[in-house]
Image (cartoon, rainbow, N blue to C red):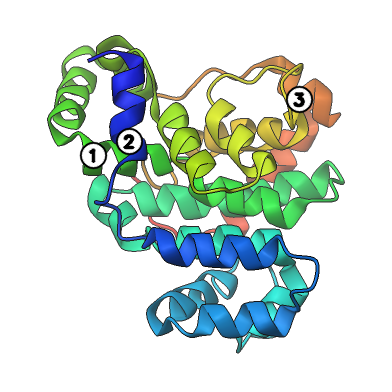
Amino acid sequence: MDIDQIRERIEATGNLPAPPDVVIRVTEMADRDDTTGRQLGMEIAKDQVISAKVLRLVNSGFYDFSQPIATVSHAVTLLGFETVKSLVLGSTVLDMMKDALPGLWEHSMACARTSALIAERAVLDDAQEVCTAGLLHDLGKVILRQTMEDAFIRVVHFVQERDVLFVEAEEHILGAHHGDFAGWLLEKWGLPDRLIYPIMDHHNFQENRPFAYSTAVIHLADILCRAEALGRGGDLKIPSLNPAALEILDLAIEDVIDIMERMNEEMRDIRRF
């Protein structure tokens, strides 16, 4: 199976628990100039399961609101259309993250919170959306499990036998990796490029690629969460850090040490592997 066949199979998937009509409907409303936050919130609230999961995410700690958020409409007002649109997608794969790989949900949550810490330290304007990208950065592993379970099993076995990164096993067996898989599906679903690129490129940061600042945050957050064993990404390795990610964020090693200290203070509720 070549890359084009893999992409076609992923884009055609109906196995993910995210009904594309919900994602598409919310995306269309969020992209219209005349849509109000109340209208978007009411549309999401029509699906009680998804709205409950969105609120669970909003109140889970990585947005650091001082008071609980009780309604989706309130979340839309505070976070903006694009972030809530991304959260709708994230809410639909919560359970699948837990089932795909042991520790994947914990790792995703830790990466989201760490992304917020890094974005705050680097004084980025889009910290909340970067946080959502951190939550979804390993979505491609869920997609691989749901669309090509035979290939997923081969990747897992290769990781165990060769003691390599999950992404390296994917590239060896499939010629593409989970960043690609997530990017293809998110693009088809109409999610914004500023969410897609950081997810696609988080294992291969390049400062000349679009949305490099956000990608640098996710790249660093993933590595720090691996180093601190917060959750698990499917292997026992720590990816290499591209020093250019620190340069573009204007962060020194002292900043990274401070971020890691805050991680240890603020993520005691996340299971370590």
Query: Is 125 drawn above or below residue 166 in the view shown?
Result: below
Badge 3 is on which residue? 246
* Residue 234, visible in the rendered structure: no
Q: Nearer the viewer, mark 3 or mark 1?
A: 1
Badge 2 is on which residue? 10
Question: Could you say whether the residue bearing mark 1 is in a helix, strand or loop?
Answer: helix
Image quadrant of residue 219?
top right
User: Considering depth in this image, is 5 or 70 the residue closer to the camera?
Assistant: 5
Q: Position of residue 112 (x, y in %)?
A: 57, 52
Residue 8 image label: none
Badge 1 is on which residue? 147
Q: Which comes sooner in the sequence, label 1 or label 2? A: 2
Residue type at mark 3? Leu
Query: Is 220 drawn above or below residue 2 in the view shown?
Result: below
* Badge 1: residue crowd in 10 Å (few <14, some 14–19, many ≥20): some
Residue at 32% over, 48% down: 103
**Disc 3 vs disc 1: Cβ atoms closer than 8 Å?**
no
Label 3 vs label 2: CA separation? 33 Å
Task: Say left or right for 164 vs 86.
Answer: left
Residue type at mark 1? Thr
Q: Which comes sooner in the sequence, label 3 or label 1? A: 1
Label 1 vs label 2: CA separation? 6 Å
